[in-house]
Image (tube, rainbow, N blue to C red):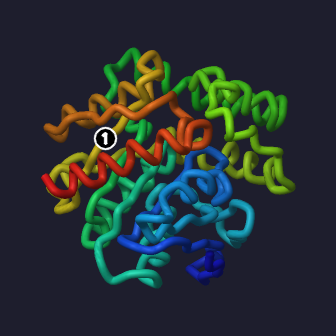
Amino acid sequence: MKESVLEVPGARLHHFVRGSGPLLVLIGGGKGDATATDALADQLADSYTVLTYDRRGLSGSTTDAPALTVATHADDLSLLLATVTTEPAYVYGTSFGGLIALELTTRHPDQVGLVVAHEAPVTQLLPAPERTVANQDFRTAEETFRTEGVAPALRWYAKFLDLDPTDREPDNPQRTPGPDDVANATVLLAHDTPTIRTHTVDLSDLKSSPAHIVPAAGEDSTHIWPNKCARLLALHLGVRCQPFPGGHNAYTYRPRATATRLRQVLTRSYSS
């Protein structure tokens, strides 16, 4: 595995490349840095050149200017991709990572061949009552962080996303919190959560993009609003929403099952 740092405007992007084959970028959600996608990347590196990275402000990707828009994250990834390949890449993004993947697709469509967006919070697609609930979930996380701190705010995230860290593959132990966990969670709650809440996807550009866009949703998370966002995105694009095993965070809890399904989707979708 090759480890590098790329200087971009206002930040330094810490990233890793492993494996061989077509380039596949993995973008985690929440406070997840590159380590959050390690288990999934290891499952895929026999067939793909897998690129993982710390988003701006997380862990090794130090920054002088925290990202205040999803576009900044997408532009960061565009610059990173340009150093690795000149060909359109496969992109898998989940939750906030899915939102970044969609923004990359509209802003830099020539760099994306196929994007799998797993439960990306495209809240503008939700009916008004559910959109209000989603926005309030984010506002509650932000307010809880301001008044009570990181841990209670993360518990609220886990509640409205119905995250169950015990629902995992038996050989995939729970990650021990690292030294950057609190700092990464602070970035999520202070900067990324307001960014997600106020972001609007350009649906017209998304629909006209030359990239193949595959919305995906967890088989066990049909009761949460990010799952409905995925299904509504598929309806808007006129494509099928692809089912993935597990719930919202299955990429970390069930990396083997997620990798198996991702291989199927990449192969079948790209050849169709």
Q: Position of residue 104 (x, y in %)?
A: 37, 62
In which quadrant is the N terminus drawn? Answer: bottom right
* Helix, strand or loop status at disc 1: strand
In the displayed structure, would residue 215 be above or below residue 180?
A: above
Total labels drawn: 1
Left or right: where 79 falls relative to 167: left
Q: Which residue is pictured at 41% across the width and 27% down the height?
A: 227
Left or right: where 79 falls relative to 171: left
Q: Position of residue 27 (x, y in %)?
A: 51, 55
Type of amino acid under label 1:
Pro
* Residue 236, quarter of the rendered image: top left
Q: Which residue is mark 1?
A: 215
> Quick one: 81 or 157, which is closer to the camera?
81
Q: Position of residue 20 (x, y in %)?
A: 45, 74
Q: Which residue is pictured at 47% across the width and 65% down the height?
A: 46
In the displayed structure, would residue 28 be above or below residue 77?
A: above
**Mark 1 residue crowding within 10 angstroms, few (<14) / some (14–19) / many (20+):** many
* Residue 215, quarter of the rendered image: top left
In the displayed structure, would residue 205 be above or below residue 150?
A: below
Q: Position of residue 83 (x, y in %)?
A: 46, 84
In the displayed structure, would residue 5 be above or below residue 193?
A: below
Left or right: where 209 falls relative to 38: left
Q: Which residue is pictured at 65% across the width and 68% down the height?
A: 65
Q: Which residue is pictured at 38% across the width and 47% down the height?
A: 262
